[in-house]
């Protein structure tokens, strides 16, 4: 597609439920990032995918968080047993080839009640 | 995770004024990026910098890659109301693939 697409745009869930967030990167972009942005805060790195290499999971805050990516396409971020502190905007970004330019989607606003 | 120090945290300026903000780190970066984020949207890339000392413009925006490679600056000339938003710097080191983000500068332009 023309840009990075994320769905859903908003997700309200109850504490303890699992949620799955989706990201469609720009076509042909090999690198994909997930970030978390709490209200009024900067961007917190979660995970990075590059082609078929092992992902960099160093930013995942707990084992309740996981992410997958199929080849160089769609990625899903899964949060199990959601907690109220998981409430945030989850942003996905992609980058193509040797480019240093990172392009973001509009994010998924997650609210855990 | 590591974050870049960005200042000022917020700015309230009159329309037509120039704006300056900066980003500093204790680490050396190979790439600096500047983004603007509006409510309910993801960050939008404004300018990318790749070499120490590089000065790059995008319309009324000018950004510089600091000589020490530990800082970067963004200037906005003749501000207009639509410049309102939060501006983030981001940097990437020469090792690893992570982009580290600043804490953001919130800009308010008063007509």
Image: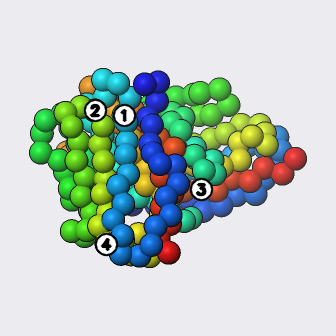
Mark 4 lies on residue: A81
Mark 3 lies on residue: B105
Mark 3 lies on a secondary structure that is: strand
Q: Position of residue B104 (x, y in %)?
A: 54, 56
- Label 2 – label 3 distance at C-alpha: 33 Å
Q: Position of residue A4 (x, y in %)?
A: 43, 35
Name above or below for residue A18 compared with residue B59: below
Mark in front: 1 vs 4: 4
Dot 4 surroundings within 10 Å: few (below 14), some, or many (20 or more)?
some
Marks 1 and 4 belong to one chain: yes
Dot 3 surroundings within 10 Å: few (below 14), some, or many (20 or more)?
many
Name which residue lies at 70% across and 58% down. B11
Mark 1 lies on a secondary structure that is: loop
- Label 4 – label 3 distance at C-alpha: 34 Å
Q: Is disc 3 in contact with disc 1, using a CB cutoff of under 8 Å?
A: no
Is residue A61 at least partly visible in the picture?
A: no
Specify which label sits upstream in the sequence, 2 or 1: 1
Mark 1 lies on residue: A25
- Label 4 – label 2 distance at C-alpha: 26 Å
Q: Is disc 2 in contact with disc 1, using a CB cutoff of under 8 Å?
A: yes
- Label 3 – label 1 distance at C-alpha: 27 Å
- Label 2 – label 1 distance at C-alpha: 6 Å
User: Is A53 on the left or on the right of A104, as rendered?
Assistant: left
Mark in front: 4 vs 3: 4
Mark 2 lies on residue: A73
Callout 2: chain: A
Name which residue lies at 68% across and 53% down. B107
User: Is A57 on the left or on the right of B108, as rendered?
Assistant: left
Name which residue lies at 19% across and 51% down. A56
- Label 1 – label 4 distance at C-alpha: 26 Å
Name above or below for residue A81 compared with residue B14: below
């Amino acid at each position: 597609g023309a840009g990075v697409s994320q769905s859903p745009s908003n997700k309200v869930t109850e504490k303890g439920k699992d949620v799955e967030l989706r990201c469609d990167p720009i076509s042909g972009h090999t690198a994909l990032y997930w970030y978390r942005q709490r209200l009024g805060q900067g961007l917190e790195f979660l995970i990075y995918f590059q082609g078929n290499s092992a992902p960099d999971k160093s930013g995942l805050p707990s084992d309740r968080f996981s992410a997958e990516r199929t080849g160089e396409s769609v990625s899903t971020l899964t949060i199990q047993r959601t907690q109220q502190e998981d409430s945030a905007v989850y942003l996905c970004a992609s980058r193509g080839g040797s480019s240093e330019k990172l392009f973001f989607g509009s994010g998924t606003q997650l609210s855990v009640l | 995770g590591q974050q870049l120090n960005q200042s000022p945290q917020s700015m309230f300026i009159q329309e037509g004024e120039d704006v300056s903000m900066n980003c500093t780190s204790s680490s050396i970066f190979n790439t600096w990026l500047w983004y603007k984020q509006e409510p309910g949207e993801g960050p939008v890339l404004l300018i990318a910098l790749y070499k120490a000392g590089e000065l790059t413009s995008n319309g009324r925006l000018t950004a510089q890659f600091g000589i020490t490679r530990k800082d970067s600056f963004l200037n906005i000339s003749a501000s207009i109301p639509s410049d309102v938003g939060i501006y983030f710097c981001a940097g990437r080191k020469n090792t690893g693939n992570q982009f580290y983000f600043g804490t953001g500068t919130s800009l308010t332009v008063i007509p």
